[in-house]
Image (cartoon, rainbow, N blue to C red):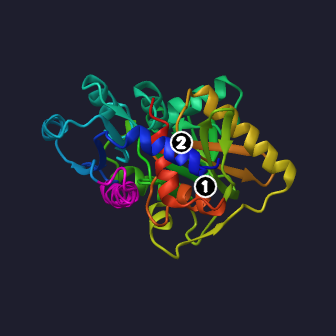
Amino acid sequence: MIINEELKQKILNRFKNKKIAVLHGGQNEEREVSLRSGQNVFKALSSFDELKDNCILIDVQDSYELVKTLKEEKVEYCYNILHGTSGEDGTIQGLLESLNIKYTGENILVSAVCMNKVYTKRIWKSSNVSTCDFILLEDIKEISESGVKDSNTSFNFPVILKPISSGSSVGVSLIKNKTEFDNVYSKLEDIKNYFLEPYIKGKEITVGLVKEENGIYVFPILGINPKNEIYDYDAKYIPGKTEMEMPAKLSKEVENKVIETCKKAYTVLGCAGLSRIDAIIGEDNEVYLMEVNTQGGMTDTSDIPEMAKHIKMEFKYLVLYILSLLK
């Protein structure tokens, strides 16, 4: 994926007289990450002379105020860098479509499906895309010293607890035994929003994909070596908590398997924008897809900018390319 001078100018000419709003912030647990992402995106767009006078940055805290601002400013395009609930689950997408404003990222349906990790995994499983089994927390029938089970599936400890519809690894826990499970379970406010996966020991990776004219472009695979036991929120966003391998140290055979698996996973979900798929390469060399993120972070420690840097793509051109995907 290369933005040469001709393509750059074509994109800038297309948007130079258009009012563009960068949406960031939000009112959920991922607010701080979104604020940092939005500042970076706004700075990148404003660095182009053709765009700097037409870009505004909006901290989204109230839907009524957002609609009011969008109308007053006569916004035509939104660069959506909201994360989590309301930002990437189809909610803001529906609001923008009702206002006839084009936006970056996936459409309402794809956003809603991909935000729900369980729906995502069900689609992958029905399409023979490799992902591990899961148990909804509310469906657990038995908890023993060795593990947990529902009507059809059983996992031995350790297990991973995940929220069904949150990003940035918020609420993710590694549970090693029944005592830890009981302790974590007792603190949950809504068990209907959580599920369990088996803990898969292996190499964590993340894969960036984006549609381009001749197919799907796959960024160099990023290897993730967290200093914490799992790649949790702190490991993602506190500098020094994770060592990144760029590119990931994989055999050519495994690398090709990852690329083909992720391309199929992206396609069956109906993705068309920039997405990032997280996976684990098990000790059996199998690829286990974990989840897909349709609104990846754009902070100084985020994964997609790191991938772009490896292919010598400046951050501002990555941002410009994402803007160009607007139809």
Eye-nearest disc, 2 or 1:
2
Marks 2 and 1, how far apart in space?
Answer: 33 Å
Extent of the magenta region: 31-52
- Residue 149 % position (x, y): 58, 38
Disc 1, SS: loop
Query: Can residue 141 be seen at all in this image of the molecule?
Result: no
Residue at screen point 41% across, 58% down: 44
Mark number, residue 158:
1
Query: Is tag 2's residue or tag 1's residue first in the polypeptide sequence?
Result: 1
Query: Can residue 297 be seen at all in this image of the molecule?
Result: yes
The quadrant of the picture occupied by the C terminus is top left
Q: Which residue is mark 2?
A: 274
Residue at screen point 20% across, 36% down: 74
Badge 2 vs badge 1, beta-carbon distance below 8 Å: no
Residue at screen point 16% across, 34% down: 71
- Residue 78 % position (x, y): 33, 40
- Residue 295 % position (x, y): 45, 45
Magenta-span inclusion, residue 36: yes
- The secondary structure making up most of the magenta span is helix
Query: Which quadrant would residue 67 be assigned to in this image?
Result: top left
Task: Identify residue type, mark 2.
Answer: Leu
